[in-house]
Image: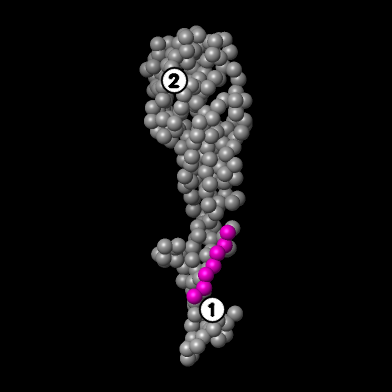
Amino acid sequence: MPCACSCPPPCRCSSTLLLCDTTTTTTPVALTIVDDTVATLGLEARFPDLAGSHAALWSGGSLTYPADPNGSAGDGTQVYRTAVGRITATPPNCEGATGTLTVSARVTLNGPGRGQREDGSLRLFRNTTLTGFDNVMPDAPVGHVETLTTSAPITAADLASGTLYVALYLETFHVTSKSWTADQFTITAQLNGCAVQFLRTFVIDCNTGAILNHSDTTLDGRPYTPTGQVGQCSAPGDSSS
């Protein structure tokens, strides 16, 4: 549509649109983890909650799993104290994107007892469904140190809905009492199919409305080159001058 022009020919005006580039590159996502409980995951009686806040673990610090004196806190025979975290994120312009969630943690068996068969596990859940796990070495000796890592497929909708959970459980009583230290926790999410917002400015002939050329920039004015499919954003905006 021709724009108004009071100056002599040639007359030019510009129009700027907010567009989205659905890139072919992988986009890292900022995540939030808050404490949750084993009841959310529907775990068995032998997996009671680890008492207290787990925030130190989720932030990469150290968390102690104290030894249980007997099996009364679990199923009477075994106790696997469990720290559960609920994972959320609100990645912008990622509707329909899919990717991978990865968690890792280091565990140290302090004793005084050694591990008995299944010693613990780092696990990922979607609601109550197990999606990934890495188990501690069975029958671990006192002083055993191991880094656990597991990954699972996710969608942007999973992150936004808050249906993803991480759980780290460690055996604090089975035949003998034992304590653990968990630390060096990390979590990353990568999504494919997110869109990058950018501005496209058109130079228009005022009299005919013909688009003469255009240029693309980031939202803060730096040159930008689209790498994927360009289209309107989910919440489009535009301005003209």
CA–CA distance in space, label 1 to label 2:
66 Å
Q: Tell me: 83 left or right of 111.
A: right
- At x 55%, y 20%, the residue is 47
Q: Nearer the viewer, residue 200 or 175?
A: 200
Residue 158 shown in magenta: no
Residue 237 on the magenta span = yes
- Residue at x 53%, y 56% (from the top left corner): 195
Percent position of residue 93, x then y: 55, 54
**In the rendered image, is residue 105 in sight?**
no
| Mark toward the start of the polypeptide (1 vs 2) | 2
Image coords of residue 157 (percent x, y) = 60, 45
Which segment is the magenta one? 235-241
| x and y, in percent, of residue 82 in the image | 51, 23
- In the rendered image of this protein, does residue 99 appear above or below residue 113? below
Mark 1, residue position: 211
| Residue at 57 percent of width and 62 percent of height | 236
Q: Nearer the viewer, residue 143 or 177?
A: 177
- Residue 65 is tagged as 2
Q: Is residue 89 visible?
A: yes
The disc placed on residue 174 is: none
The residue under label 1 is which amino acid type?
A: Ile
Q: Is residue 217 above or below residue 45?
A: below
Mark 2 burial class by Cα count in 10 Å: few <14, some 14-19, many 20+: many
Q: How many marks?
A: 2
Amino acid type at image mark 2? Tyr
Q: Nearer the viewer, mark 1 or mark 2?
A: 2
Q: Can you give x and y, in whole percent of width and height, for residue 125 in the image?
A: 57, 32
Circle 1 sits in a helix, a strand or a loop, which is it? strand
